Amino acid sequence: MQELFQEKDYLNGRFFHKRAYYLSVVAAHIKKHLPVDLFYDSTNSDPRLPSLLIQSKEGWYSFCTLLENTFLIYPDESKFDFSSAKARIRILATLAQDSPISLKHIGSTHCNIRIPSSPNDVPTHRYNDALLQSTSGVPHLLSTYEIKKTVDCFSDALALLRIWANQRGYSRGKEGWSILGFEDRGPFWSGLLELMVKGDASVKGSKSRVKPVGRGLSSYQLFKAAIGFLGALDIPVSVRHSDG
């Protein structure tokens, strides 16, 4: 995918257009060679960040035809049937760290939507954030994998935190409501726990704002540390109702 991009593709949505094109080519290739169903989804309901969802064709069509008391059988394609896992495969297109698009142009104070009739000094916060999300996937997975190896309770604490978050609407709302901005923020919760363990010492020589809690806590203690940190923040929230 790297060959698609040029240095100034951070401007005026060019990166997002090329990213969507790349995913459409991948989707066409998968559809041509595998007996699966494909769907498009958008992270945080942002059309700039589409992803591909792959679902087993056998499981999908069996569900659709069950009402008519008929069943579809794919004897030659059973090896592709993963419907029993009740899972979907999601494909995300990410931008490598060595891409020609420099991150220095995507800071929070930059304006990356250039319109001749409008001032170019108004920061495009959401636009820049969406582009940054396309660069953080792989580094985040590697960082989470490393901390799981060194902190025994991390996985259990993350499970507790995700359950707590889902029960309070910090997910795609199954009961008709959800907190805006948290629908697809799965990496946020593991990143929060990593912040609790490591602390905030990203700037060399600066005073840490978040002290590390240590690596010897139990899963419940690490979970409570994360909840305490969130409780000390003053974050306004809005609620979305699925019925509009």
Image (spheres, rainbow, N blue to C red):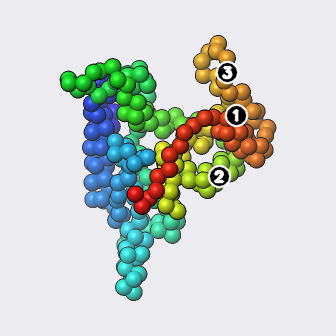
Please tell me whether residue 101 is drawn above or below residue 4 in the rendered image: above
- Image coordinates for residue 218, horizontal then vertical, percent: 78, 44
Q: CA distance from mark 2 to mark 1?
A: 19 Å
The answer to which of marks 3 and 2 sits earlier in the sequence is: 2
Residue at (36%, 29%) from the top-left corner?
124
Query: Which residue lies under the disc numbered 2?
Result: 164
Residue 140 seen in the current view: yes
**Crowdedness near tag 3: few (<14), some (14–19) or many (≥20) residues, C-alpha within 10 Å:** few
Query: Which residue lies under the disc numbered 1?
Result: 197
- Image coordinates for residue 172, horizontal then vertical, percent: 49, 55
Query: Which residue lies under the disc numbered 3?
Result: 208
Please tell me whether residue 199 is drawn above or below residue 84 in the rendered image: above
**Crowdedness near tag 2: few (<14), some (14–19) or many (≥20) residues, C-alpha within 10 Å:** some
Please tell me whether residue 128 is drawn above or below residue 161 in the rendered image: above
Quarter location, residue 115: top left
SS at badge 1: helix
The quarter of the picture where the C terminus appears is bottom left
Please name the amino acid that badge 3 sits on.
Answer: Ser
SS at badge 2: helix
Q: Is residue 196 left or right of residue 23?
A: right
- Image coordinates for residue 73, horizontal then vertical, percent: 38, 78
Quarter location, residue 201: top right
Label 3 near label 1: C-beta < 8 Å?
A: no
Residue at the left extreme, as displayed = 116
Please name the amino acid that badge 2 sits on.
Answer: Trp
